[in-house]
Image (cartoon, helix red, strand yellow):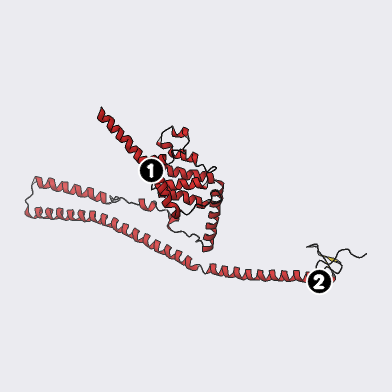
Amino acid sequence: MASSNHCSFCRKNPGICICSGCRAYFCDDHFKDHRGMLANELDGLTTERDVIQEKISKAISHRQSAGSLLSRIDEWQRTTIEKVKEAAAQAREQAFQIMNLKREEITKQFEIISQELKELSDTKCVLEQDLTRLKQDIDQLNQDLEQLSQPPPAKLNVKQSEQIVWHQMIYVEQQSTDADQQRSQSGQQMQHLELAGMDADLNFRIALIKIQHSLTNEDRQQLNFIFGDDIPRVLRENGSLENSINALQATFDRLKISRTNYEYLVQALQAIQRHDCAQRLIDYARFNQEIIPPLLNWQHQQNQAETTIGSRISKSQVVASEILADLDDEDDDE
């Protein structure tokens, strides 16, 4: 019975052979070609394997050539041992000096006593006081000799050497290659972008909180005048300067804010000369373009914004001056 399957290669001849790997049907000629192609691929993999083996051999050879690093470690060991020996020799010399100093003192005192005894013996002019004093000197000399046989009155100070962290004095660490650094930076950037996308609302509130802490009371007063009509009534009636940015946060919430209002907030901060706070919001908008539309050209609109908002600040200053003048008039009337 003829096969109903055709060769998957020529699509003409009947498929009388089936490959158990790809499960495709082939005619007799093309089945041989298919097997030959698989054999060629296997040969290619074998060639790649040989190349890898050569690379491994070179890598092992390179590792063995790292003997220069081991030589430096050996050199450090020799140098450190020499320094330890020098320090120990210096300590021995100090101990010898302390012991020799006491010996020299005893020898000098012995010579003095001997000379005085010889003089008194030669002159025969000896008194009871001389004998008493010489006896005391000899007793003291015996005490000094007994102390000389004991350990010297010196202290061995090894506190600093005991505090040495030997495994931190010398160690070898792997040095990152340029490729490793690029992979690490790429991973950090991707993680940062993912976190920014997940916590965009939180990031915006953090930006506002940072701005809030950096504003002075004068800045808050000016913002109150600028946003006075836009702040919700219940917050405006509170009258607390500390609630100014809280009111702005409620007004310019990320879930509700439009590009116009966002730009208005930035322009207001620029108008009161808080360009650092304005730049913080600009940078945030650039980083989160999918959440907040890109801002307009600030260089192009800055003069117009400062004129509009600046006139509002000037008006508020005039009102404040009039209030102060009225208060002065009331004081004069009293």
Q: Position of residue 325 (x, y in %)?
A: 30, 35
Residue indicated by mark 1: 313
Please determine whether, in this image, residue 264 is positioned above or below residue 6: above
The alpha-carbon separation of the residues under discs 1 and 2 comes to: 89 Å
Is residue 312 at least partly visible in the picture? Answer: yes
Taking the image as shown, residue 283 lies to the left or right of residue 153, namely right
Taking the image as shown, residue 216 lies to the left or right of residue 21, namely left
Q: Secondary structure at mark 1?
A: helix
Q: Position of residue 16 (x, y in %)?
A: 86, 67
Relative depth, front residue between 92 and 258: 258
The residue type indicated by label 2 comes to: Lys
Please determine whether, in this image, residue 94 is positioned above or below residue 53: above
Q: Position of residue 13 (x, y in %)?
A: 86, 69
The N terminus sits in image quarter: bottom right
Quadrant assignment, res 84: bottom left
Relative depth, front residue between 259 and 120: 259
Is residue 216 at least partly visible in the picture? Answer: no
Residue depicted at 38% across the width and 63% down the height:
82
Taking the image as shown, residue 184 lies to the left or right of residue 225, namely right
Residue indicated by mark 2: 32
